[in-house]
Amino acid sequence: MKFGREGPQEVISMELQSYVEGKWQRGSGNGTTLVNPANEQPLGTATADGIDFSRALEHARKEGGAALAQMSFAQRGEMLRAIAKALHANRDELLSLAMANGGNTRSDAKFDVDGAIGTLTAYADWGVELGEGPLLADGDATQLGRSARLFGQHVYIPKPGVAVHINAFNFPAWGLGEKAATALIAGMPIISKPATSTALVAYRIAQIIVDGKLTPPGVFSFIAGSTGNLLDRLTGHDVLAFTGSSGTGSALRATKSIINGNSRVNVEADSLNAAVLGPDVENDSDVMNLFLSDVVRDMTQKTGQKCTAIRRVYVPKAKVATVIEQLRERLGAVKVGDPTREDVTMGPVATAQQLRDVRSGIGKLATAAKIVMGGADPVAGIGAPSGKGFFVAPTLLFGESPAQGDAVHELEVFGPVATVMPYDGTAAQAAALVAAGGGGLVTSVYTDDKDFLRGAIVGIAPFHGRVVIGSSKVAGQAIPPGTVMPGLIHGGPGRAGGGEELGGRRGLAFYMQRVALQGDRALIDGLLKR
């Protein structure tokens, strides 16, 4: 397939292959068809049926594991740096693929691809900082005897298995990159499996890694299609990291081999992320502008198909009308259509099923809230063929009486949809409403009132992996809450899956075994030398 800066120049269906056992392999059968969500033209097919996953796992464990064991943290870091540089060298092509197969605007495509490059680079730097030693110390040493000679030290060492990564459809580049970065620095070989519907970007990344010989044999494997019986063959030394729906996450956790072998599983699932406007925030202030900008960005960036997108917006009752008016004005400027056009600012959702789910979800939210803008009706995308494309309008709802258990607090609509709801201006009620979402990845609080902030954080933080504080002092340099930072954990309790990814050095722990060493201090210190 030929791609340029503005997307596909010609439509040629291609066959995606899997890279396992050190070679590219075709699957059997017709497989899944990948399409351009703006015009529904086929782009390729993918199937992994017939792949011998037992041999694929064994090759990764033996060849890849052995190769990584011979590398220091610093050498693994330089391996990641080489991958990041190669992706940057092919950036325009990756952006075009994201626009074609993901329905991304160029800006949205950059968010995904540059996120992958940035995360790989960040972990490359951390790998170099960790140095040449084979182990990582965990906390301080403990003296066990009467003298300092006999002591104990907790350390981390790579698990002797393989890391299976199952990524979501919305971030084929960043999802691959963030999981690969932590696993490879930790010393585990990976088998990366993207969501099939939007796999073109991940497939091209796999080609770049393989063609450039950027990893030793067995360190990187790639599956284009279904995982088949792969998960049935995992052992207690293997790990599984999954991003996707809570239903699929639960099903994966129930895999017999995972239960019997106690394989580690990390799930990042649904999340009803929230934004809370403090009672002190004045109209036309820097904090109000930050709040409005963040809500609109999170609703429309990647067409709202972000696990970190703001779904619930809590506003003091006296400010609700003003906030809705300003959000409607900003959302009204959004241009929906073919994402390769410069005048389009929001593309389609990624698949026909996603479109059906979003339309159905809006209808369910409307049982607890009133649609004040947008809705589930068909949308004619700018520049798209008549009747084609998976387009949906930015949709804003108003829930006058929010309550735990209503649709707004139970259902994540994975599209450009958010609901504004009032609260009484107290931190206690704001926190209780946010907590009604059952656990999330991120909530943002906008205020300069320290007392309100203290109460909000105490009530909100236990239900989230990250809390973003928007205030006047940082308004000019604030990083949007929907942006995942490699140095901060990404994950959350409850509905969000109960997992953690990234977080700098913390992200390595999932891929390593913590063990207590007990003995002569000089010998153990020698093992920890860089």
Image (cartoon, grey):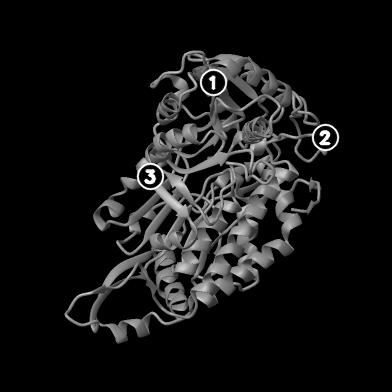
Residue placed most toward the observer, 55 or 365:
365
| Residue 387 appears in the picture as rendered | no
Expressed as whole percent of the image width and height from the top left, the position of residue 289 reads 68, 32
Name the residue that disc number 2 marks.
343
Q: What is the total number of numbered labels drawn onto the structure image?
A: 3
Residue drawn where x is 49% and y is 20% of the image: 423
Check disc 1 and report its element: helix, strand or loop. Answer: strand
Which residue: 61% across, 43% down? 33
Q: x, y percentage for residue 189?
A: 46, 67
Please state if 149 lies on the left or on the right of 158 as rendered.
left
Residue type, label 3:
Gly
Q: Is residue 298 above or below residue 327?
A: below
> Mark 3 highlights which residue?
498
SS under mark 3: loop
Mark 1 and mark 2: span between their CA atoms? 35 Å
Q: Secondary structure at mark 2?
A: loop
Question: Earlier along the polypeptide chain: callout 1 or callout 3?
Answer: 1
Give the distance between the C-alpha atoms of the residues marked 1 and 3, in whole angstroms. 30 Å
Foreground residue among 455 and 186: 455
* Outermost residue, left side: 146
Q: Does the CB distance between marks 2 and 3 fall below 8 Å? A: no
Residue at the image position 75 percent from the left and 35 percent from the top: 345
Task: Tell me: 184 left or right of 10.
Answer: left
Q: Residues within 10 Å of mark 3 (few under 14, many from 20)?
A: some
Identity, as a three-letter code, of the amino acid under mark 2: Asp
Viewer-nearest of labels 1 and 3? 1
Q: Quickly name the residue at label 1.
A: 316
Compared with residue 291, is residue 328 higher up or lower down, i.e. above or below?
Answer: above
Residue sitting nearer the eye, 429 or 210: 429
